[in-house]
Amino acid sequence: MRRSPGRTLLAVLAIALGVALGLAIYLINRSAADEISLAARSLYGLADLAVEGGSEGFDEDLYPMVARVPGVSVASPVVEVEAKLVGERGALTLIGLDGFRSQLLQPAFAAAIVSGGADERGAADDESEQDTTGAFDARTILLSATAARELQLERGEFVEFQVGVQRERLRVSGVLPPAALQEFGGVVDIATAQWVFGRLGKLSRINLRLATGTSPEQVRAALTSILPASVKVTTPGEASDDALRLSRAYRSNLTALALVALFTGGFFVYSTQSLAALRRRREFAVMHAIGVTRSQQLLLMLSGSVIVGVLGAAIGIVLGVMIANLGLSALGADLGAGYFRGLAPGLNVHIAEIAVFSLLGIGVAVAGALRPALDAARVPTASALKAGDITSGEIRPHGWTVLTLTVLAAIAVSLPPIAGLPLPGFVAIALLLIACVIAMPSVVRFVLRHAPRSSHIPYEIAIAQISGTARYATLSVSSIIVSFSLMVSMAIMVTSFRDSLDQWTQKVLPADLYVRVGYVGQSAFLDEGLAESMSRVPGVDHVAYSRFARAQLSADRPALTVIARTLDRERPDEALWMMSTAATDVPEGSLPVWISEAAADLFAISPGDQIELTLGGKTVAASVRGVWRDYEHQNGAVVMDRNDYLALTGDRAINTVWFWLEESADIAAIGNAIRDLLPPGTEHDLRTPREIRALSLAAFDRTFAITYLLELVAVTIGLFGIAAGISAQVLARRSEFGALRHLGFTRRQVAGMLAIEGSVLGTLGVVVGLLAGAVISLILIYVVNRQSFHWSMDLHAPLGLLAGLSAALIGAAALIAVVSGRQAMGGEVVRAVREDW
């Protein structure tokens, strides 16, 4: 290791970078997940069970029935509202509580309420009973610490919400301690939540504390027997699982991508150890001759890899914690994806996590060195003493091994996801990469045998050299094959996703102008009269309306987003990107609906199927008329005609108005006229399709920014492999260069020969990487992505980007070979020849 400090350092860095990225992404993801779990748990306090309704809640008359169920000790009603903030993007989660009941389940809330009430009335008598509703006046709110920090509000200031198009002000009576409410939210009196936000007679949830010794399962069964189908019984743990389910696929895929760097580092160790073993063959033979056993030699080589693994893991742990800290401060817990808005988790590192990633780094280093160590130990002593350093090593085709790995990869691709994650797809990718590396020497030998001939002597020597040492020559490019193929596959997948998203926005945004007020479950919306007045603005040809809501398809799954919009039932493809349609007619008494791909996958629904939706407290029989492509709603969405929605729910509120303008209309003037119709200060989003597309693509690029960084690191490790591998071979051929100089070769000719060798090896690595990357991209697009997010996409390859990357890697390989050759020829030629025994 001391004799080759450069390659040793590169091996350590390769392992360190892999461990650092894997640990950093894991820590950020775990911190976000912990924060989400704490946030969900804080909403339930000390509750054992909870009775929950859908997005519309349930009738508050259920409350006394639930409270009287045997085994229920405390029942605390809750109204939860997504209150649209004025002057801020997004909504604040408002929790409406009964001040008397909640103190038994949520002591942290009760303490803050008491504190706020005491401050409102002045100093209270210590011996008098505290009034727990003192801070719960009709127009006050207790903000969470996260909300107060993000909104920069203090006690006594006001926060404004939009209800419909009207503005409602609540005074901040205090700030909750961080442990009381983890979410970006606030607490108000339950009457305020119902009255101000239009939830009269409705509850969202009832938190339950069970009597000591009561069986939760018996209480759960008793509750289920008296509750309607749209209301379910859950636990705080199940609620946090629901909150995390949406981001789980993104977090898991990101962690897998981070570990790609470690996977590439393992191949780097494999190539460097193989070349080191090759260079030391005669040294090992002499050691055998003086009494060192093969087992001792194997142990010595593996010990060196353990040292590399320990050093790399130690550096990687430190780097990983630093990167995690920087990532949380720069990108936040969502890493740019927008899943965890408002979260600011602290970074807690557990000893077990450090131990696991340390063992992972050491294990990868040892695994990379195991095959070279075994091969070196098996070489007969006599042949090792006679053989040359580089020219030895016959090629075994390993055809059956490659075929077996390929078949196993094909089987893995066909397997369903495990626990909702595309783990078989990742296994298939790993198997394909290993098969490519194993097959590479045979590929090189076959290609070079059919290479064109030339009278250029350096070219002929370079081709003969690579062909004669194909097994070892390709070791230097094994890590670049792995990293480049993964970069190619990710580039194709991301480009396909981005182009498909762009085409999708063009398809689903056929109007000339859009006005949106509020979103799914939010308190902001347009009333029908105001929306109709917008349709009469001069220059508007016609309009369409849409309303967002939620519907439950299964009590065990998250709700679907309902998009109730003006729709031509006979031609839904004019407004939706239809993937498949039903061949049968709508059955009598069924409501025609169109579901997204995510809903079709999650609930195993096909066009023509009959489903039952719980919408507005009613169970509705619906017929699925088609499946459409949707990149917006990961939990699934269902589209229905607005007239059908009105008949079912009576909800005439509107979230989006679609404007088709006359040919000569001035969009800017029409936009100003629409704004003038809105009450002053109304929060709204008025945009053209071009602007919406630009925002969508910007959000996409922000989400995938971290993947570009991870790919870059993987390719950097691959370049480490080229540098270490080619330099090892070149340095081991000093005597060969000396002989060539004696025969009349100039330094320029030797450098040209090395450049050709580097270019040929780089080209072969790039070509194999391109082919393997193309196959892996198909797995990512049609298996991993579909199983993770339930989105389909069309195949698009960034040919210009791939061509540029290929040329850069081939040039880097040639340059590294030339630079290494200059170092090898730095001494006297005669001395180089004498090095050959």
Image (cartoon, rainbow, N blue to C red):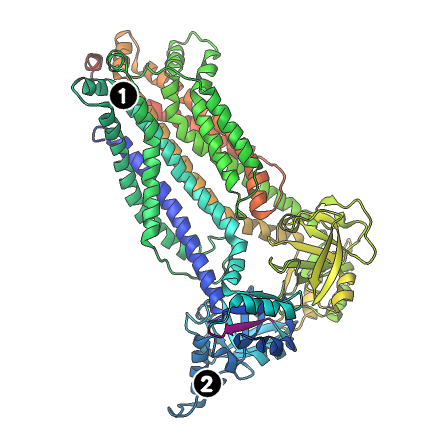
What's the magenta bit mostly, secondary-structure-wise? strand
* Side of 659 relative to 392 (left or right): right
- Specify few, some or many for label 1: CA neighbours under 10 Å numbering under 14, 14-19, or 20 or more: some
What x and y, as percent, mark residue 12? 30, 37
Residue identifier under label 2 = 117
Asked whether 205 falls inside the magenta stretch, the response is yes
The CA span between labels 1 and 2 is 80 Å
Answer above or below: position of 688 versus 477: below
What x and y, as percent, mark residue 258? 43, 43
| Whether label 1 touches label 2, CB < 8 Å | no
Which residue type carries mark 1?
Answer: Arg
Residue identifier under label 1 = 279
The part of the chain drawn in magenta is 204-212
Which residue type carries mark 2?
Answer: Gly
The image quadrant that residue 530 belongs to is bottom right
Q: How many marks?
A: 2
Residue 379 at least partly seen: yes
Of residues 505 and 412, the one nearer the viewer is 412
Of residues 482 and 749, the one nearer the viewer is 482
What x and y, as percent, mark residue 10? 31, 34
Answer above or below: position of 465 versus 218: above
> Which of marks 2 and 1 precedes in the sequence?
2
Of residues 655 and 781, the one nearer the viewer is 781
Answer above or below: position of 43 versus 173: above
- Specify few, some or many for label 2: CA neighbours under 10 Å numbering under 14, 14-19, or 20 or more: many
* Side of 514 relative to 88 (left or right): right
Quadrant of the image for the N terminus? top left
